Amino acid sequence: MKSFTEYLWFNTPTRRGLVNITEEIGAVVGKSGVREGLCLVSAMHITSAIWVNDEEPGLKEDVMEWLEKLAPVADYRHHRTGEDNGDAHLKRTVMHHQTILPITKGALDLGPWEQVFYAEFDGKRKKRVIIKILGE
Amino acid sequence: MKSFTEYLWFNTPTRRGLVNITEEIGAVVGKSGVREGLCLVSAMHITSAIWVNDEEPGLKEDVMEWLEKLAPVADYRHHRTGEDNGDAHLKRTVMHHQTILPITKGALDLGPWEQVFYAEFDGKRKKRVIIKILGE
Amino acid sequence: MKSFTEYLWFNTPTRRGLVNITEEIGAVVGKSGVREGLCLVSAMHITSAIWVNDEEPGLKEDVMEWLEKLAPVADYRHHRTGEDNGDAHLKRTVMHHQTILPITKGALDLGPWEQVFYAEFDGKRKKRVIIKILGE
């Protein structure tokens, strides 16, 4: 059995955004030498998420607008702490903060349109994603 | 360590629907020979999901009606590409597209009411789910 | 390869609530002896969830209030069975019922604010969470 860990760092120029990280993850899988296994990709900060969906600009705008309706910027109790990112904690909850990608024959085993995005809801600062691979 | 991979194919007769796949997954676990491990079940198409919940007809109608409220059929930017399934991408996001099932003593280790559903939001065409098992 | 399984039992005094289980999970990881691996934490009952977010009282109230808006107590078809917890099935769907935690150097590899919560939406009765660890 093999395990392999790597951390990706982010510091998005805007507060919110979607960053396609499919290629970076594929490169980590290659480096790991794992041929058959599971690859965890998990946001380590609680105002960002991992989203598996389509690399289509219109859809990416749609999902961000939709999240604003479901979990709007508003006056949350959480803001009594001095924070102003209550909505970001909720948006990340809808999107979910992690995914497990299958590895088959040494590569990510994704469907034809599956792309992996880092979803930032409170950016402009350093944040991390862990990639943890387990397999053989 | 053992790994085992199988793909389930779907082609639902209706555009939306929930298909109980608990037994199929259990059969794949049996075939894998894994006694202790983890079983990833992940939709490989970005307008379908995997939902773990109750096999109760009323609840299954409730969840589909509720998803229509949260992520309605509407005019999305995504439709500029010629697609008409923007809502399906969002519904799949709420439901999440994958689950990890524990395997204990050679079988799925599920709670008394846990059933696994393939949730289709843009069907009537061929789609795949990957089952990837890792364990011993 | 090593695998390790433990079940946590809950019987919350209130119908809804968030219980921080980060320390309990860490203790199970220690007991497992696994140094590098993945730790599945999954609610085995279909009206509860696992939420990874901030241990901040205001935010915890915010998320419960927000879930009530997204998936309100109402008259669901599911209630024809005699149940009255349709909202709990939907709230658990938004929150997702499981998480995979990375294990690095023998401990949970969490970000600075990541805490793991058992989220109960139909409590006052015995329920279980499975912890399943795979690694080396």
Image: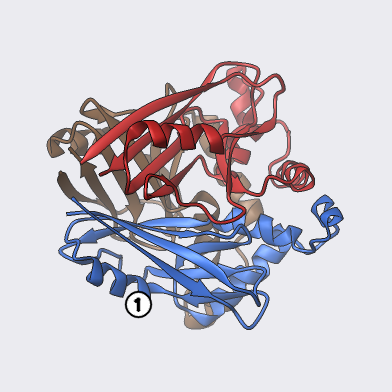
Chain colours: A blue, B brown, C red
**Residue C10 percent location from the top left of the image:** 57, 22
In the displayed structure, does residue A30 sit left or right of residue B50? left
Q: What amino acid does circle 1 point to?
A: Glu
In the image, farthest residue toward the front: C105
Judge whether residue B110 can be spotted in this image.
Answer: no
Tag 1, which chain? Answer: A
Number of numbered labels in the structure image: 1
Kindly identify which residue carries mark 1.
A23
Label 1, secondary structure: give it: helix
Q: In the rendered view, tell whether residue C77 sits above or below residue C98.
A: above
Q: Residue at x 36, y 35 (%)?
A: C132
Callout 1 crowding tier (Cα within 10 Å): few <14, some 14–19, many ≥20: few
Residue A18 location, quadrant: bottom right
**In-front residue for pair B107/C27:** C27
Q: Where residue C17 sits: x, y (%)?
A: 69, 31
The percent coordinates of residue C80 (x first, y second) are 61, 22
Q: Is residue B74 above or below residue A58?
A: above
Point 62% across, 46% down: residue: B66
Which percent across, then down, holds residue B5?
18, 50
Horizontal side, residue A66 vs residue B41: left or right: right
